Amino acid sequence: IGLGIPAEPLFRSSIEAMLLKAMSEPDSAAYRMAYIYELDKAVTKEEARRALDRIAARHEVLRTAVIYRNISEPRQVILNRKPSVVMRDIRGSADPEKEILKIREEVLQGEFDLENQHLFGLVVVRKTDESCYIIMSVHHMIMDGWSLRPLVTDLSRFMLEETSGEGISTASDDRIMDGVYERSVRKTLLLDHRKGLEYFKKLLKDYDSPAEIPSFGEV
């Protein structure tokens, strides 16, 4: 499979909480995210595949899965597999905006197997002969709002290069960062987490207002 990274104790308050939610409510869309982008280009499956392969090669966290069945301790694992690309076509739709929102909802409500399915993928939806939507689906286990900007920046550049025919000449210049995620996880595992807990206990000591955390990325 690849590298196994222990889920404890780093993810006790984050990934393990999401894992518990997924195990107890497998049909829940909580912690699933799907972002819609519109391009003034018609992207083919081959172009999207190449762009996605490049971004997955650069960011190894996009190739991870969470293994938890039939083992004593959940583990996040870096897999040697390609994230998914799905093609849809809504050319001729009387209301493309309504249709793309419907597809997004299907992505959110669809099966999300943390062990066997990709936690990151693209749905390319042809809008017209000259334009398309891109739905980027990702599980919150591997990405949050802070991660979105650099990821979208890379994806936009790779998609532009592939659709313009420049991908072959520029792909060799891609900055590959294999090992960065693993090293950051292992470094964090060595930290004194008790100090972190004490810090937040003190910080939130007088906080008594209810805080609602939305499941669908909407505030």
Image (tube, rainbow, N blue to C red):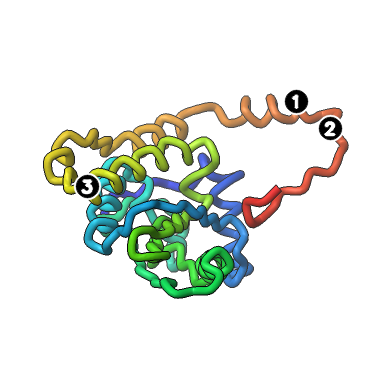
What amino acid is at disc 1?
Leu
Instruction: Please tell me whether residue 22 is drawn above or below residue 17 in the rendered image.
Output: below
Q: Position of residue 198 (x, y in %)?
A: 69, 27
Query: Which residue is rendered at x = 52% and y = 67% of the image?
Result: 96
Q: Nearer the viewer, residue 76 or 175?
A: 175
Q: Position of residue 208 (x, y in %)?
A: 87, 36
Q: Are marks 1 and 2 in contact (CB under 8 Å)?
A: yes
Q: Position of residue 109 (x, y in %)?
A: 56, 70
Q: Is residue 107 left or right of residue 184?
A: right
- For discs 3 and 2, the disc positioned in front in the rendered view: 3
Question: Earlier along the polypeptide chain: callout 1 or callout 3?
Answer: 3
Gap between marks 1 and 2 measured at Cα: 8 Å
Q: Position of residue 24 (x, y in %)?
A: 62, 67
Question: Earlier along the polypeptide chain: callout 3 or callout 2?
Answer: 3
Please give the residue where the numbered disc 1 appears in the rendered image: 203
Q: Nearer the viewer, residue 7 or 215?
A: 215
Q: Are marks 1 and 3 in contact (CB under 8 Å)?
A: no
Q: Secondary structure at mark 2?
A: loop
Q: Are marks 3 and 2 in contact (CB under 8 Å)?
A: no
What amino acid is at disc 3?
Ser
Please give the residue where the numbered disc 3 appears in the rendered image: 164
Please give the residue where the numbered disc 2 appears in the rendered image: 207
Query: Quick check: can you spot residue 66?
Result: no
Query: Quick check: can you spot residue 38?
Result: yes
What amino acid is at disc 2?
Tyr
Gap between marks 1 and 3 measured at Cα: 51 Å
Q: Quadrant of residue 128?
A: bottom left
Q: Secondary structure at mark 1?
A: helix
